Amino acid sequence: MEAALDVLWPAHALVFAGLAALVFLPLEHVFPARPDQRRAAWAADLLFATAGAWLARAGTIVGVGAALAALDRLAPDEALFAGVRDARMRTGLDVACGLALFELAGYGYHRLAHKVPWLWRLHRVHHSSVSLDWLASFRQHPLEIVLMTLAQNALLVLAGIPLGAHTTVVMTLRVATVFVHANLRIPEGPWSWFVATPRFHHRHHQLGGETCNYASLVPAIDRIFGTYRSETATVFGLKPPQSARASTMLSSIEQ
């Protein structure tokens, strides 16, 4: 009964979207990467952030939950770093390993989403935004969220990453996803090698540009696989432009 209520109750999506707005709206106002950017399609993206997130959550609990439960039976009985006696070091290793697996799986899925036609029909919903900011991060087809959730979490389950570390990884990537889409001016520095910035990810959304910069958090992955580009993006969206109406979210897979 509690699980059913958890699916139906939309508070999780509303709370996360609200917290993201409280953090990133003031930052974008003070440190904008593109001060002259004019935001359009607020209503559509808010729908993605709320109703779309609710649909994705329902699909994740019903479908992905069962798949991950089946994979969990194949996981080792002992935690990956159970032999490490120091609890802090063990937790740190669990989180670091989880982040690496999560990012590698996400990178692989992201590249496939740009190569496999039916996956691209889902993914192009995300690329349809002509304005990149914190809210644009929520514009994703619910079915794509379900598929990516399965792809990114499967390796962590199979590796036996403990639940606490697993949760830390998921929340870190969730916040990072909003951050890299934000209209924020982050100066380049040594950290740009290790942590994805908005400038790094915005290049991925460049209209008409070579597809690159697939990683969500660790740019080193793109450097290793030769998909890193350093140019600054200026124009975003699809050609021809795609409607951002709510109906697009449901019909894109049929086109």
Image (cartoon, grey):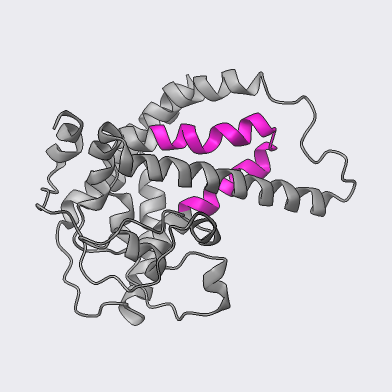
Q: Quadrant of residue 182?
A: bottom left
Q: From the viewer's side, name the closer residue of 215 and 76.
A: 215
184 in relation to 10, above or below: below
Q: Residue 229 appears at what percent x and percent y?
A: 40, 66
Q: Quadrant of residue 161?
A: top right
Q: Residue 132 appears at what percent x and percent y?
A: 27, 63
Q: In percent of the image, x 77 and y 34: which residue is there?
A: 79
Q: Quadrant of the C terminus?
A: top left
Q: From the viewer's side, name the closer residue of 254 and 149.
A: 254
Q: From the viewer's side, name the closer residue of 207 and 49.
A: 207
Q: Residue 194 appears at what percent x and percent y?
A: 57, 66
Q: From the viewer's side, name the closer residue of 28 and 157.
A: 157
Q: In percent of the image, x 34 and y 40: which residue is there?
A: 113
Q: In percent of the image, x 36 and y 80: which residue is there?
A: 31
Q: Quadrant of residue 140?
A: top left
Residue 61 on the magenta span: no
Residue at the extreme right of the image, as rendered: 85
Residue at the extreme front of the image, as rendered: 226
Q: Residue 219 appears at what percent x and percent y?
A: 51, 61
- The stretch in magenta equals 147-174
Residue 165 on the magenta span: yes
Please give left or right for residue 88 compared with residue 149 in the image. right
